């Protein structure tokens, strides 16, 4: 059950006209009052043909008129409006039940506290099976204003109790970190202008898309402006950037003026102070292009950064930082991935945005590696090869599962749900990313004798999951991956153990696919030659001993002349 308190209004008669009218699409049927303040004698235009909306408005506004006449100072923001809607799958509720629900909500809000005969005047109007509208005037019978601070939280708690008591769908308790839902006016405006999103939703997408590209607040503002966002900034006397508001081109008010939304209103984690903290924590020591010379690609480096992410979740502030940075990496990957993966990755990134924020304060510097990986990806000029992309998307799947589990453990219900939604889309993207690689690997299987040896390696290395792995349709491709790694000097059973340790296989839909991406990633380079490495260490050790002996004067170096040697001995 959702109770959505609307901004305070000033026209009681106008709101009644909507509630008792036909609706925008003739959807209002049989409007009538199901509960209200001092029901006896209250006019109901829906049940009494002689009653009028004006008469009902005067009845509700009586305390407001008395206060305005007595004190002189006019109260204009006195109309409290709260639609209350049941879930589509909920059972039919009678008028009496809706009346009881309305009474509980106005008590929780502070409109009509329990046992208080001098509360505000209110009514609950029903004009559809699945919802009611509560209208109240917020001046009490004793002339005081109702104490409504925090009413949204109290009403939310009341709704959770109502759901349980009436056997309705039980929603999860909010924690104050969710984005504001679009108002009906915003949705109608978007529909009228042919926009698929409301302005706030459109702006949130563009702001999140900008974050991986920039390293500072000024650069962030410039990037938004360059990407077509209208930006209004607030600066201090010194010129320092203190805040910003963003607007969608074409979103204007009745006077034709651009409408701006403060970053914190677009989403709680998009205020300028929070964005600055994230950017400053990941400011690179060198320009991102400097890291492109690293022998590993940004896609491999991003997968490397995710490999140990789950080990840093013991500290809550670190876990929250990693989850926030993971959202940035998801966004960066969606921007730079091949076209056939972008749709699923973009939906995953959008879903995960809700999982990025909680009441736990993030230690942003803990997530430097993940955030730097996101920045490197958006700055790279080349796309990923198939195996690198598959490895990264598979790593993103596992990291998002870890994030969902952490949120579950912390009772962050909305965040955990958002992460699970993201996992579903990431798994689809992972399947698409791996498909070409699977086809290529399956087409060149190892010889039968080698395959039998590899079966033994699987049974020895991961005995608890061996049967599922060998029954997986992707097993022939995994056998090829293991044979390729062995040809580069790796030991298949060791690679299998390491891969299974990094990503548990119990919850994997297709364990062979998981192992393919892990082993291709970790075993992509030739294994070091142990004998050559031992010889190199012996040579290095001998050279260092010789240097120390020369330095201590135990015997001459090749560059020391006899005269210098004699002089040193005399000293």
Image (spheres, grey):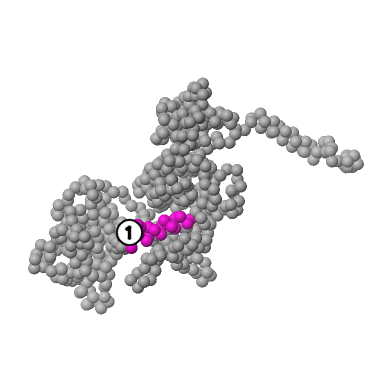
Q: Nearer the viewer, residue 360 or 306?
A: 306
Q: Nearer the viewer, residue 109 or 497?
A: 497
Q: Where is the C terminus found, in terms of image quarters?
A: top right
Q: Is 449 covered by the magenta stretch?
A: no
Q: Find numbered disc 1 in the image and state the secondary structure of the residue it sits on.
A: loop
Q: Is residue 359 left or right of residue 115?
A: right
**Position in image of residue 178 (x %, y %):** 36, 54
Residue extending farthest to the front is 443
- Considering only vertical position in the picture, is 328 above or below 489? below
Q: Nearer the viewer, residue 332 or 320?
A: 332
| Residue 553 falls in image quadrant | top right
**Position in image of residue 423 (x %, y %):** 40, 43
Would you say the magenta stretch is mainly helix, strand or loop? helix
Q: Is residue 231 left or right of residue 22?
A: right
Q: Is residue 412 visible?
A: no
**Position in image of residue 274 (x %, y %):** 46, 57
Label 1 Cα crowd, 10 Å radius (few <14 / some 14-19 / many 20+): some
Q: Is residue 42 left or right of residue 319?
A: left
| Magenta-tinted stretch | 193-211
Q: Is 202 covered by the magenta stretch?
A: yes
Q: Is residue 568 left or right of residue 484?
A: right
Residue that carries the numbered disc 1 in the rendered image: 182
């Amino acid at each position: 059950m959702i109770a959505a308190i609307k901004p305070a209004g000033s026209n009681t008669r106008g709101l009644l006209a909507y509630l008792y009218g036909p609706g925008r699409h003739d959807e209002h049927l049989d409007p009538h009052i199901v509960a209200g303040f001092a029901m006896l004698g209250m006019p109901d235009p829906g049940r009494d043909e002689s009653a009028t909306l004006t008469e009902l408005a005067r009845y509700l506004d009586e305390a407001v008129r008395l206060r305005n006449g007595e004190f002189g100072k006019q109260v204009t923001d006195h109309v409290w409006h709260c639609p209350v809607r049941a879930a589509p799958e909920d059972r039919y509720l009678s008028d009496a039940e809706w009346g009881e629900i309305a009474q509980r909500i106005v008590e929780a809000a502070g409109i009509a506290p329990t046992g208080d005969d001098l509360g505000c005047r209110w009514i609950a109007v029903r004009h559809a099976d699945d919802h009611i509208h509560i209208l109240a005037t917020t001046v009490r019978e004793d002339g005081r204003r109702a104490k409504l601070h925090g009413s949204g939280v109290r009403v939310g708690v009341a709704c959770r109790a109502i759901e349980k008591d009436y056997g309705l769908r039980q929603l999860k308790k909010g924690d104050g970190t969710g984005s504001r839902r679009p108002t009906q006016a915003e949705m109608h405006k978007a529909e009228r202008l042919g926009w698929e999103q409301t302005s706030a939703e459109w702006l949130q997408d563009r702001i999140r898309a900008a974050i991986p590209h920039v390293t500072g607040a000024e650069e962030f503002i410039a990037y938004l402006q360059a990407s077509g966002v209208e930006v209004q900034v607030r600066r201090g006397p010194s010129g320092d950037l203190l805040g910003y508001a963003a607007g969608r081109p074409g979103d204007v008010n009745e006077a034709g003026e651009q409408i701006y939304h403060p970053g914190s209103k677009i989403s709680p984690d998009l205020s300028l102070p929070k964005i600055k903290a994230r950017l400053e924590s990941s400011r690179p020591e060198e320009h991102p292009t400097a890291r492109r010379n690293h022998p590993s690609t940004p896609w491999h480096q991003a997968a490397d950064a995710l490999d140990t992410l789950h080990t840093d979740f013991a500290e809550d502030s670190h876990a929250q930082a990693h989850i926030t940075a993971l959202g940035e990496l998801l966004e960066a990957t969606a921007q730079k991935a091949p076209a056939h993966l972008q749709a699923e990755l973009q939906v995953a990134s959008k879903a995960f945005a809700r999982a990025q924020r909680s009441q736990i304060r993030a230690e942003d510097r803990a997530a430097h590696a993940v955030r730097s990986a996101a920045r490197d990806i958006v700055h790279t000029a080349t796309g990923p090869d198939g195996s690198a992309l598959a490895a990264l998307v598979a790593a993103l799947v596992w990291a998002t599962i870890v994030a969902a589990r952490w949120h579950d453990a912390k009772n962050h219900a909305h965040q955990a749900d958002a992460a699970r939604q993201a996992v579903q889309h990431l798994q689809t993207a992972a399947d698409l990313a791996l498909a070409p690689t699977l086809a290529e690997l399956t087409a060149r299987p190892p010889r039968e004798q080698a395959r039998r040896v590899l079966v033994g390696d699987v049974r020895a290395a991961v005995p608890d999951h061996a049967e599922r792995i060998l029954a997986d349709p992707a097993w022939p491709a995994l056998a090829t991956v293991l044979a390729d790694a062995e040809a580069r000097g790796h030991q298949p059973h060791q690679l299998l153990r390491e891969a299974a340790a990094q990503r548990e296989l119990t919850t994997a839909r297709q364990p062979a696919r998981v192992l393919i991406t892990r082993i291709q990633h970790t075993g992509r380079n030739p294994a070091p030659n142990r004998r050559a490495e031992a010889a190199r260490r012996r040579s290095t050790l001998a050279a260092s001993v010789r240097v120390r002996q020369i330095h201590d004067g135990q015997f001459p170096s090749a560059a020391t002349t006899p005269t210098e040697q004699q002089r040193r001995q005399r000293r």
